[in-house]
Image (cartoon, rainbow, N blue to C red):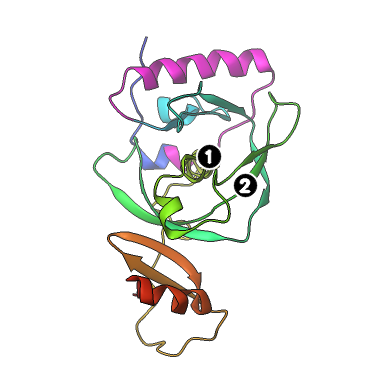
Amino acid sequence: MSYKIVKNKDYLHKKTTPVASIEEGNDIANKLIETLNGLPYGLGLSANQIGIPKSVSVIRARKDRPPVVLMNPIITESGSEKLVYLEGCLSLPGKQTTTLRTTKVTVSTLNHANPMPFGPDVEPMTQESTRDDYGILESVVVQHEIDHLNGILMTDDGVRFVMPTKTAVKHGRNDKVVVEKDGQTQYIKYKKALELIGEGWKII
C-alpha cells in the first residue's frame, strides 16, 4: 500500500529515533520505496514523511541505479565547498526554497559496512558541470533527507539561504559571494567570482 505524505510541520520538526535492526529498517525502506513509486516525482523520502518516526531514508536521485537506503544515517564528514541550490519537498508541496549545501558529504549508516561518500561526478567542478551533475544532486538529496530525520526542514533558519545584504559593497578576496548566470547560482569566494565575470556571470 502507498502511504500518505505528512505535511504537518509540528510533526516533521520532531527528531526520529534509530531503528533497532536492519530487518526493521528494510521493512520501513520497502514502504518508502513503494510510496515513492506511486508518486509522479520525488528524489527521496524519509520515514517520518509517511508517519513513521524512525531514522530511515531512501534516496532516488539517480534513475539508472536502485534507490539508496540509509538507516540511522550520520554525516561524519562535510566538504568545504558549498553551493546554493533550489530545493523542493514532498511534504511542502508547491514550495521551493534556495538552500546552502556542501557539495560533498560522507555518511555512516547501520546497513552499510563502510562510510558512504556522496559528491560531484565531475571534478574539478565548473559552472557547466554543476548543472547536470547527478553526484551533486544526490549529495543535496542526502543532506535534505538526513535533515528530515533530525526534524529539520529546508525552510528552517540555517538551511535556507538568505541573500547577503547589499550594504556590504567591499569584499575581501576570500569572502563568499553569490554569482548568477542564466538562472544558475553559485556560492564561491570573491576572487573566483571575479574570474567568472568575463564569462557572463554577475555578483548578486
Per the image, label 2 sits on a secondary structure element best described as strand
Q: Kindly identify the amino acid type of the residue bearing the numbered disc 1.
A: Val
- Give the crowd class for mark 1: few <14, some 14-19, many >=20 residues within 10 Å: many
- Indicate whether 61 appears above or below 118: above
Q: Kindly identify the amino acid type of the residue bearing the numbered disc 2.
A: Val
Which quarter of the rendered picture does the C terminus lie within? Answer: bottom left
Please report the residue visible at 44 percent of the width from the left and 52 percent of the height from the top: 130
The spot of residue 85 in percent (x, y) is 41, 54
Label number found at residue 37 = none
Please report the residue visible at 36 percent of the width from the left and 71 percent of the height from the top: 199
Q: Which residue lies under the disc numbered 2? A: 105
Q: Which callout, 2 or 1, points at the residue further toward the start of the chain?
A: 2
Q: Nearer the viewer, residue 98 or 91?
A: 98
- Is 14 one of the magenta-colored residues? yes
Q: Nearer the viewer, residue 38 or 2?
A: 38
Q: In this view, does 179 lie to the left or right of 114?
A: left
CB of mark 2 within 8 Å of CB of mark 1? yes
User: Could you tell me how far apart the alpha carbons at marks 2 and 1 are, in whole angstroms?
Assistant: 8 Å
Residue extending furthest toward the right: 113
Please report the residue visible at 63 percent of the width from the left and 55 percent of the height from the top: 79
Per the image, label 1 sits on a secondary structure element best described as helix
Residue extending furthest toward the bottom: 170
Dividing the picture into quadrants, the one containing residue 110 is top right
Label number found at residue 142 = 1
Q: In this view, does 163 lie to the left or right of 29?
A: left
The spot of residue 69 in percent (x, y) is 57, 25
- Is 172 one of the magenta-colored residues? no
The spot of residue 59 in percent (x, y) is 49, 30
Residue range corresponding to the magenta coloring: 12-41
Q: Is residue 157 left or right of residue 40?
A: right
